[in-house]
Amino acid sequence: MAAAVASPKGRFSLPPLPYTTQALAPYTSERTLQIHHGKHHAAYVANLNAALEKNAGQRYAADLSLEDIILKSHQEDKADGPVFNNAGQVRSAPIAAWAIGIE
């Protein structure tokens, strides 16, 4: 397992990778995974938390799951692109790992 990455403040946090940063070598370098997960993916988590904080419970109740937030932001608030985009990206990371056979 990769080390946990410091999470931004907010409702959602960046989970650790379900594999080491060397697991995809030689196809993907350790540094690439560190940047993609630790900075790029972490930014989606931070941006989602910021967008939810901006709404302060007006649109998204605190008990909504990530999946429910994705559905609500797409179905009910088509203008809420920042929440939809960032929540979708946060949700996609575990799916990507599963798709390439890493569990």
Image (spheres, rainbow, N blue to C red):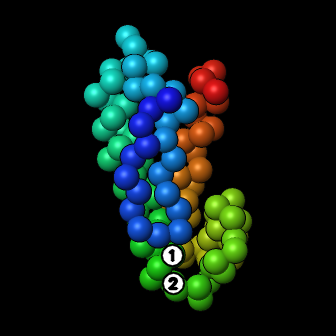
- Kindly indicate the quadrant of the structure image that contains residue 59: bottom right
Callout 1 secondary element: helix
- Per the image, the residue denoted by label 1 is 52
Q: Residue at x 40, y 14 (%)?
A: 25
Determine if residue 77 is in view: yes
- Please tell me which residue lies in front, 95 or 17: 17
Quick check: 70 left or right of 25?
right
Callout 2 secondary element: helix
Determine if residue 81 is in view: no
| Mark identifier at residue 60 | none
Q: Count the labels in the image.
A: 2
- Per the image, the residue denoted by label 2 is 55
Q: Position of residue 4 (x, y in %)?
A: 43, 43
Q: Residue at x 63, y 21 (%)?
A: 101
Q: Residue at x 51, y 84 (%)?
A: 55
Q: Residue furthest bottom?
A: 58
Q: Position of residue 50 (x, y in %)?
A: 42, 73
Quick check: 4 left or right of 75?
left
Quick check: 11 left or right of 67?
left
Q: Are marks 2 and 1 in contact (CB under 8 Å)?
A: yes
Q: Residue furthest top?
A: 26
Q: Position of residue 79 (x, y in %)?
A: 54, 76
- Please tell me which residue lies in front, 18 or 59: 18
Q: Position of residue 102 (x, y in %)?
A: 60, 24
Kind of residue at disc 2: Asn
- The residues tagged by marks 2 and 1 sit, at their Cα atoms, a distance apart of 5 Å
Kind of residue at disc 1: Leu
Q: Residue at x 64, y 77 (%)?
A: 62
Q: Quadrant of the C terminus?
A: top right
- Give the crowd class for mark 2: few <14, some 14-19, many >=20 residues within 10 Å: few
- Give the crowd class for mark 1: few <14, some 14-19, many >=20 residues within 10 Å: many
